[in-house]
Image (tube, rainbow, N blue to C red):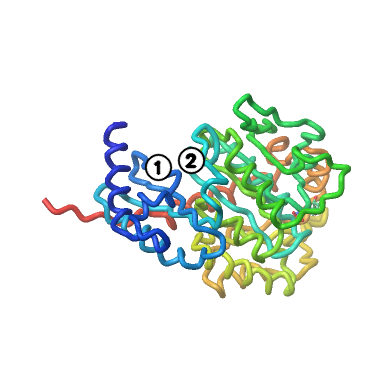
Amino acid sequence: MNNQLADLAERVKARLDTIKDPISGKGLFTSGRVTGLEARSDGKVSFTIEAPKDVAELYVPVRDRAEDAARSVEGVSTVIAVLTAEAAANAPPKSAGGVARVKQIIAVASAKGGVGKSTVAVNLACAFASLGMKTGLLDLDVYGPSAPTLLGTGAKKPRMRDDKMLEPLDAHGLKTMSIGYLVDPSSPMIWRGAMATSAVRQMIDEVVWGDLDVLVLDLPPGTGDVQVTLVQRVPLSGAVIVSTPQEMALADVRRGLAMFEKTRAPVLGVVENMAYFETPDGKRAHIFGEGGARRVAAEVGAPFLGEIPIDVALRESCDAGAPLVATQPEHAVSKRFREIATAALANVARMNKPAPTIRVK
Ligand code: ADP
């Protein structure tokens, strides 16, 4: 089996060498630009192309050609080629850590803060775990990390191993990492772009994520360059966009969708948070308007994953560091999260289907 995989990887390397590296003129693999090449038994092949920062644009068509070339190798079902604009020497891939052994990576995004993105990310992760999946949560909100509060990990610090790899913290059945674990919460969180980028790289590549079925990324709010660069660093299976029903927020959903279009990650769907408030007599008050996110999703052709009401128990569970889905699994809102998790997984399977291979006898 391993021999077969090694053979598949070798054939992919040889095929990549049929493409010229635009700078050295050598074959793309021989040039050293391709790192972290991995072939899996299901035919999934992933690798990174490390482009020099100042000429990264040159490598966009190279990435596309490399993806096509790898896909044309017999036995390959899907190909994920990630383009990074870094000097290769800066980031030697470490086999023990990183996300190489993570089956699905799902980003949770929102166009602005305060819509409940982190609340959804954490509870969605707990919902995946409750469905029996080995789940991780990576809080990438370098500007306002919320995992230490939402998960109740407080001042606990991750352990650094002898090989300088960080061990994620276990919380509520999840493997978790957050910039909030690494930086003293009382120190001012002023991040310059470069610092944020290196912190993010550390949390992806230098953490012992191990074998996970799914890793949920809590992205920083917004749809700017920071977010685009970030999602380009990891082979995403797709993105979940969180919005509230207000019209303003909906304009932002469109921006979120456009961002993921750019990065070629499928949008698994839109979650409408704070959709309504249920009064004690069972009536639903649509405080922010009704069904807006569902409408926008339909308009732009993205799936709608479900609604989460405004709920006091959900808010209190966040403040208490005890995610509702993990601590009150029978709560109606927890059930909603499990339904949303199931719908998102169905879309991962549907949208990442390998292209059919034609075998000629
Ligand atoms: P974001 O990550 O988008 O900035 P948060 O997840 O931190 O937003 O949520 C902002 C605040 O709103 C938090 O206090 C959270 O507890 C609360 N909140 C989020 N969603 C809900 C909800 N559906 N019902 C009640 N409170 C919510």
Please report contact status of discs 1 and 2: CB closer than 8 Å, yes or no.
yes
- Sequence order check: which comes first, mark 1 or mark 2? 1
Q: Could you say which quadrant of the image residue 220 lies in? A: bottom right
Q: Badge 1: how crowded within 10 Å, few (<14), some, or many (20+)? A: many
- Foreground of the two, 323 or 291: 323
Q: In the rendering, at what x and y percent does residue 332 appear?
A: 69, 46
- Foreground of the two, 130 or 215: 215
Q: Badge 2: how crowded within 10 Å, few (<14), some, or many (20+)? A: many
Question: In the figure, is residue 137 to the left or right of 45?
Answer: right
What is the residue that sits farthest to the left in this orientation? Answer: 361
Q: In the rendering, at what x and y percent does residue 350 appear?
A: 43, 55
- Foreground of the two, 17 or 172: 17
What is the residue that sits farthest to the right in this orientation? Answer: 186
Q: In the rendering, at what x and y percent does residue 292 appear?
A: 67, 71
Question: In the figure, is residue 220 to the left or right of 59?
Answer: right
Q: Residue at x 62, y 49 (%)?
A: 217
Q: Is disc 1 placed on a helix, strand or loop?
A: strand
Per the image, the residue denoted by label 1 is 38
Q: Could you say which quadrant of the image residue 257 lies in? A: bottom right
Amino acid type assigned to the residue bearing label 2 in the image:
Ala
Question: In the figure, is residue 262 to the left or right of 138?
Answer: left
Check mark 2 vs ligand 1: CB closer than 8 Å? yes or no. Answer: no
Amino acid type assigned to the residue bearing label 1 in the image:
Glu
What is the residue that sits farthest to the top in this orientation? Answer: 162
Per the image, the residue denoted by label 2 is 100
Q: Residue at x 68, y 39 (%)?
A: 177
Q: Quadrant of the N terminus?
A: top left
Find the distance from the CA under tag 1 to the CA under tag 2. Answer: 8 Å
Q: In the rendering, at what x and y percent does residue 345 appear?
A: 51, 49
Q: Residue at x 77, y 34 (%)?
A: 153
Q: Is disc 2 placed on a helix, strand or loop?
A: loop
